Image (spheres, rainbow, N blue to C red):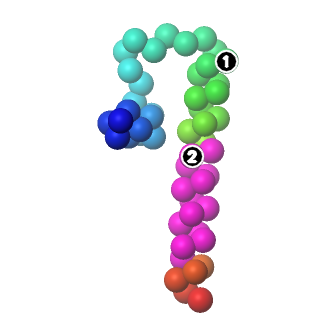
Amino acid sequence: MLKKIWSYITFWKPQDDHGNGYLKAMHTINKISIVVFLIALMVMLTRILMA
């Protein structure tokens, strides 16, 4: 399961994934939201630790 999550986060695309344009757009939006969420977590942690 961790391998699947890691491949999703690192934008590694499996060979058998032949989705349509809407599916690809959805995956791109999900990846962007994951990155923004991780950045927000880092900002919150640095603010908490600096206070």
Write the start and end of the magenta stretch as one range. Answer: 33-46
Please provide percent x and percent y for residue 13. 41, 24
Total labels: the figure holds 2
Position of 31 compared to 2: left or right? Answer: right
Farthest right residue in view: 22
Residue 35 seen in the current view: yes
Between residue 2 and residue 28, name the one nearer to us: 2
Residue at left offset 64%, top offset 15%: 21
Query: Against 33, is 43 above or below?
Result: below
Q: At 67% across and 18% down in the image, what residue appears?
A: 22
- What numbered label is drawn on residue 34? 2
> Residue 44: within the magenta?
yes
Residue farthest to the left? 3
Assess whether residue 36 is covered by the magenta stretch: yes
- Residue 15 image offset from top left, x and y in percent: 37, 15
The quadrant where residue 14 appears: top left
Q: Is residue 3 left or right of residue 39?
A: left
Per the model, the C-alpha gap separating discs 2 and 1 is: 18 Å
Using the image, tell me which numbered label, if any, was put on residue 37: none
Q: Main secondary structure of the magenta part?
A: helix
Image quarter of the N terminus = top left
Q: Disc 2 on helix, strand or loop?
A: helix
Q: Is residue 7 visible?
A: no
Q: Which residue is mark 1?
A: 22
Q: Residue at x 60, y 42 (%)?
A: 32
Q: Identify which amino acid the numbered label 1 is placed on.
A: Tyr
Could you tell me the amino acid type at mark 2? Ile
Number of other residues with Cα within 10 Å of mark 1, as a class: few under 14, some 14 to 19, many 20 or more: few
